[in-house]
Image (cartoon, rainbow, N blue to C red):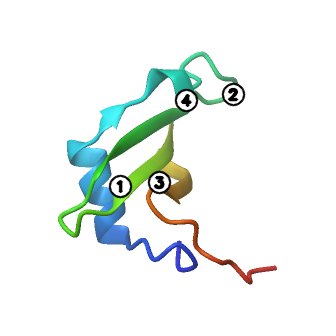
C-alpha cells in the first residue's frame, strides 16, 4: 500500500462508501469470494480495493490507485 500511497484510513473509506464492481469481482470464488470495491477517498484518490470476507474477518487482497500508475521498488 505504501508504494501506491494508500493509507489504512483510505481503505476503510472505500469499504464503507465504495461500490462493488461485479465485473472485477469473484463472488463465487473458492475458498473465499473476492469483491472489487471502488470509490473516491476524501482526498479524491480513485481506488479499487479487492476484499475477501473470511471466517476471521475482512482481508485486503490488493489495492489499486486507478488514477495514477505509481512506481514500485518492492521486492
| Mark 2 residue element | loop
Residue carrying label 2: 31
1 vs 4, front mark: 1
Q: What's the residue at 22%, 46% (across, down)? A: 16
User: In which quadrant of the rendered view does residue 70 lie?
Assistant: bottom right
Considering only vertical position in the picture, is 1 above or below 52? below
Q: What's the residue at 51%, 53% (across, down)? A: 60
| Mark 4 residue element | helix
Whichever of callouts 1 and 2 sits on the residue coming sooner in the sequence is: 2
* Left-right relation of 31 to 51: right
| Mark 1 residue element | strand
Q: Are marks 3 and 1 in contact (CB under 8 Å)?
A: yes
| Image location of residue 74, percent across then percent down | 74, 81
Give neighbour class at mark 4: few <14, some 14-19, many 20+ (Cα, 10 Å): few
Q: How many marks?
A: 4
Q: What's the residue at 59%, 24% (across, down)? A: 26
Front residue of this view, candidates 55 and 2 = 2
Report how far apart the C-alphas of labels 3 and 1 lie in the structure: 5 Å
Residue carrying label 4: 24
Residue carrying label 3: 66
Amino acid at each position: 500500500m505504501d508504494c501506491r500511497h494508500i493509507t489504512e484510513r483510505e481503505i476503510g473509506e472505500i469499504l464503507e462508501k465504495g461500490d462493488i464492481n461485479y465485473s472485477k469481482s469473484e463472488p463465487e470464488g473458492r475458498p473465499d469470494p473476492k469483491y472489487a470495491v471502488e470509490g473516491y477517498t476524501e482526498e479524491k484518490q480513485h481506488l479499487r480495493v479487492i476484499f475477501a470476507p473470511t471466517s476471521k474477518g475482512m482481508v485486503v487482497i490488493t489495492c489499486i490507485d486507478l488514477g495514477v500508475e505509481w512506481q514500485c521498488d518492492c521486492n
